Image: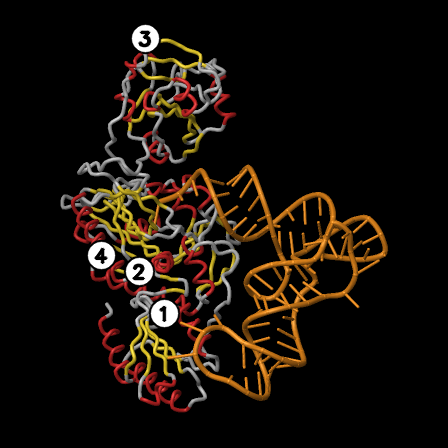
Amino acid sequence: MRMSKLFVQTLREFPADAEVISHKMLARAGYIRKLTSGVYNYLPLMWRVLKKIENIVREEMDAAGAQELLMPFVQPKELWEESGRWDAYGKELMRLKDRHDRVMCLGPTHEEIITAIARDGLKSYKQMPVNLYQIQSKFRDEVRPRYGLLRGREFIMKDAYSFDTSEEGLDKEYQNMARAYKRIFDRCGLDTKMVQSDSGAIGGSVSHEFMVITDTDAGENDVFYCECGYAANSNHAVSKLPAAVVDGKDYFTETKIIDTPNTHSIEELSKFLNIPSTLILKSLVYIVDKKPVIALIRADRAVEETKLMNAAGGNDIRIASSAEIAELMTEHGFDAVPGFIGPKGMKNIPIIADETVREMKNFVVGINQTDKHQVGTNLSDLGVENLQYADIRLVEAGDFCPECGKPLKVTKGIEVGNIFKLGTKYSKPMNAVYLDQNGKSHPYIMGCYGIGISRTAAAAVEAHYDEHGIKWPISIAPYHVVIVPVNIQDKLQMETAEKMYEELKKAGVEVVLDDRDERAGVKFKDADLIGFPYRVTVGKTITEGFVEYKTRETGEVETVKPEVAVEHLIEIVKKIK
RNA sequence: CGGGAUGUGGCGCAGCUUGGUAGCGCACCUCGCUUGGGACGAGGGGGUCGCACGUUCAAAUCGUGUCAUCCCGACCA
C-alpha cells in the first residue's frame, strides 16, 4: 500500500473527548471515528487489526474443534421470553419494532438463538459434544458508554457455545477453551491472567475471565492474585484475614446501651469509644430486586455488592437511599438515622451476615436508636430472625491467599475474554433436549465462551504504547513495515524504496511505502503514531549503499544494506504465528 | 438514575461578560521554496455558531425549552 493512497488521516492533537490511552491513540492515529455515543467507525487500519485478531481467534477455535457459524443480529422477542430474559435483561437490551409492530431486539449475546438452533438440529447424544461459535457485532445499550472501544455499545465479539451430555464433558470443553484462550492472547501479544469471577446475569455456576494486566487507568476491574497461581476478580475473590481484635471483653464487662452522640460514621464511633473498628458490627441496608436486605459485616471491612446480591439470590442491587432507610425504620417502629441502624427488631427482612461476624464477641452495634449503641453485645443477644451467613466481604490487598496463605496482591485488569459453565440454564426453560442411549430426553449441558475482539484491540494499545504512539505486536499490526524515502525527489532514494517495496510485497510482507511529498519529520511522526512494528528509512546514506532499519518496540536502529533489511523482514514475518 | 461540564468548518480552540458583517492554529486545494523528527511564503475553498421558541431594529452572544456529547458516581454477559 502506498501511503499517498492509504485512507487515513492522523491528527495533530488528541480529540478532546478521548480519555483513555487506547481511545486517544486510535482516534488520533486515524483508526477509528466516533459515529455516536459508544458507536465507532472502524477505518481501514482498524479493520485490518480487527481482522488479524479475528483470524487468530478463528484459527485457534477451529484448532480446538469448534465450528464457525453466523447468527442474526436482530432477534425476535419470543425467544427471549422463553428463556425469561426479556424481562430480566433490563434496559441494556436494545428493543425495537418492525413495520408490523413485531417486537425485536438487537443481539447483546446469543444464548437464546444458539439454544434454538441446537434444539432444532441436535437431537441425539451421538452428535455431542459440539461447540459452535461466531464472530459478530453485538449491541448493548450501556447506561454510560466510555473509554472508546473498551466499553462501546456496539462492539465485535467472538461468542462460542458448547453442548454436552454431562458435567464431565462440559468440564473438559471448559478446559479446552481455557487453553485455546491462552494461545489466542499469547499470539495477540497480550499478557493475560485467567481469574475466577462472578458469573453474573448470564447465569451458570463457574466462570473465569481473561484479564489484560495494564498500568493504565483503563483497567476497570480489580484483580487479586497470588504467586501460587490464585487469581480472582474482586467480585469473586475470597481471602484469609489478618489477625484482629474481635472480642471486646477487655473493653466491655457488661452488655448495655450507652449514649454515643453524633457518631454517624464508624470512624467517629471507634474514636468516641476508643476501640478498634474491628469491635463494631456495621449494618448496611441494600435494595436487592427492589426489596430491602440488611448486610452485617465487621466494621473495618467493606461489602462486595455482587457477593451480597448473590447471597440474597437477586439480580439487582444498590445501596438504600436515606429515604428508604427512613421508611424501613418507620415500618419497624424505629426512627434512627443512618449510623445507628442495627439488626435488632428487624423482622421479615433478610439479614445477611458476613463470615467475619461469626467470630465477633462482646461487640458494639447500632440498635435503631439515634445517638445510642449497645456495647458488649453478642449476636445471640439481639434475637435476630432470618439470619444467614455468607462471604459478602470485599477482599483487600494485604489479605492472605485462600489457597496458600501468602499475602494477596491487587492490580487493574481489562477483561478481554471469559468462559462460563452455563449448565442447563438455557436448555431447561427453552426445552432444548436430546435423547440419550435409552431414548430418554435431557436438556443439554451448556457452556459459553466470549472474546471481545474490538476490546482486545484496544487493550493491546493500552499494553503497547509510548509517548509517540502505538507499538503494535507484529501479529496484529495493520502492516508489518513502513518504508520511508526521506526525499521522494531523490531518484536513488525513491528507486531503492520502490525496489524494496516490490520485493517485500512479493514475499508476503505487509508493507506501506510512504511516498508522500512530505518532510521526513512528518513521515516519522506518522509512522510512530500509527505504530508500524518496523520502519526502513531510505535517506542520504543510500549513496554508500545503506538504509536505516528501526524497530518500533525497542527503538533500536541498525544501518544495513537494503537487501539485508528485506531478508530480515521476510524472516520475521515468516515466524509470526 | 444522581452530580459536574461542554456544544462555534474535519480536529483543537477564541469570541459570549458589555447584542451590531463569524475568527485563530492545524488539516484540505493551488503555486513557490524546502526535504532526517509535525518547515516557510503567497493565494484559496469550507461553518444558517446543536436545535426550537422568545426578547430586540438587530442574537454565536440575552431568556426559556429541548437534544446531543463528555467526565465522576451508581450500573454493567
Q: Chain of mark 2?
A: A
* Sequence order check, earlier mark of 2 and 3: 2
Q: Are marks 2 and 3 on the same chain?
A: yes
Q: Nearer the viewer, mark 3 or mark 1?
A: 3
Residue A462 in the figure: left or right of residue A36: left
Residue bearing mark 4: A180
* Sequence order check, earlier mark of 3 and 1: 3
Q: Residue A67 appears at what percent x and percent y?
A: 25, 60
Residue that appears at 28% across and 80% down: A565
Q: Is the C-beta separation of discs 2 and 4 under 8 Å? A: no
Residue A536 in the figure: left or right of residue A99: left
Q: Residue furthest bottom?
A: A491
**Kind of residue indicated by mark 1:** Pro
Residue bearing mark 3: A254
Q: Is the C-beta separation of discs 4 and 1 under 8 Å? A: no
Question: In 3D space, how far apart are the residues under numbered discs 2 and 4 (Cα atoms)?
Answer: 18 Å
Question: In 3D space, how far apart are the residues under numbered discs 3 and 1 (Cα atoms)?
Answer: 73 Å
Residue B7 in the figure: left or right of residue A557: right
Q: Is residue A421 visible?
A: yes
Q: Are marks 1 and 2 on the same chain?
A: yes
